[in-house]
């Protein structure tokens, strides 16, 4: 359970005015959006990468580790596919509401958990892929998350026997060019860019913020980011708690 962080009322009112006045809002988010759903983030103070482990997770979640030590990869990955008790949080739900109201045009996420779609969002760019999509490394056959959860040990293709790989971007792999281009175009077209739940440290995703040419940049994050100085408004808090106070008109 995340500790609640009080946010000054004047900051909430400032954010409300920006939401009321925008016509083309884009949201760019990371792991911090889903921590309020019960998932562990990566780079926060208590994140997965700061938790002692026998094998560093940045090594486990790499292209080489997957193909060279596949069985070990799945022993660790399987426990992190999705927490059964985790569901979309207030942030996911409010963003979906903003989309239905015509305010929010695009969500760009670094997460792979599908929570935005579960909450009802439709225009979602998944920069780092999704655990809901999995493909055979030999024949390309598709497998859903249910197959991956039910498989014992390393999952193999029923068609050809090849190893199945999650459609997620591992270290040493590139973000799909079409996803990166779509994100660039969405951010460039926005008049209001809302960044939330991300440290803005992971490249090339973090660099996408530089394509913003609109008037209003807002960052909501528990910890400071290197882009704070560029923002009109920086709110230190839990994004779900902050967005739940915003009224969609």
Image: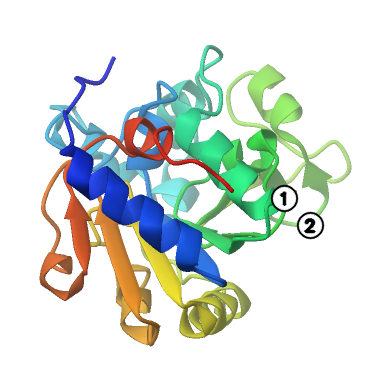
Q: Tell me residue 101's x, y (percent).
A: 68, 52
Residue ID at (17%, 69%): 227
**Residues packed near mark 2 inside 10 Å, few (<14), some (14 to 19) or many (20 plus):** some
Q: Is residue 7 left or right of residue 68?
A: left
Secondary structure under the numbered disc 1 in the rendered image: strand
Number of the label disc, if any, that sits on residue 135: 1
The answer to whether the residue labelled 1 contacts the one labelled 2, judged by CB atoms less than 8 Å apart, is: yes
Nearest to the observer: residue 11 or residue 180: 11
Q: Locate residue 140, reporting x and y percent.
A: 79, 57
Cα distance between the residues tagged 1 and 2: 5 Å
In this rendering, does residue 163 appear at all?
no
Among the 4 quarters of the image, the one containing residue 9: top left
Q: Residue at position x 59%, y 78% from top?
A: 182
Identify the residue shown where x is 75% and y is 27%. 147
Compared to 218, does 82 lie above or below?
above
> Does residue 216 appear in this view?
yes
Q: Which residue is mark 2?
A: 140
Q: Is residue 19 above or below residue 73?
A: below
Neighbour tally class for label 1: few under 14, some 14-19, many 20 plus, Cα within 10 Å: some
Q: Is residue 11 left or right of residue 224?
A: right
Element assignment for label 2 = loop
Q: Position of residue 96 (x, y in %)?
A: 62, 44
Q: Position of residue 21 (x, y in %)?
A: 47, 66
């Amino acid at each position: 359970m995340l500790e609640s962080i009080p946010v000054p009322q004047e900051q909430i009112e400032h954010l409300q005015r920006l939401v009321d006045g925008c016509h083309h809002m884009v949201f760019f988010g990371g792991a911090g959006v889903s921590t309020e759903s019960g998932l562990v983030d990566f780079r926060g103070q208590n994140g997965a990468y700061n938790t002692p482990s026998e094998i560093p997770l940045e090594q486990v979640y790499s292209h080489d580790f997957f193909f060279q030590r596949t069985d070990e990869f799945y022993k660790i990955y399987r426990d992190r596919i999705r927490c059964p008790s985790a569901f979309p949080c207030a942030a996911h739900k409010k963003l979906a509401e903003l989309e239905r109201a015509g305010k929010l045009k695009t969500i760009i996420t670094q997460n792979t958990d599908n929570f935005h779609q579960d909450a009802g969002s439709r225009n979602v760019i998944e920069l780092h892929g999704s655990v809901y999509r999995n493909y055979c490394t030999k024949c390309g056959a598709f497998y859903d998350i249910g197959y991956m959860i039910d498989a014992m040990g390393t999952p193999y293709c029923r068609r050809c026997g090849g190893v199945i790989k999650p459609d997620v971007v591992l270290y040493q792999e590139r973000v799909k060019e079409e996803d990166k281009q779509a994100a660039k175009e969405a951010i460039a077209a926005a008049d209001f860019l809302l960044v939330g739940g991300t440290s803005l440290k992971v490249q090339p995703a973090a660099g996408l913020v530089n394509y913003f040419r609109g008037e209003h940049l807002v960052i909501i994050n528990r910890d400071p980011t290197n882009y704070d100085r560029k923002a009109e408004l920086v709110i230190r808090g839990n994004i779900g708690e902050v967005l739940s106070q915003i009224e969609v008109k």
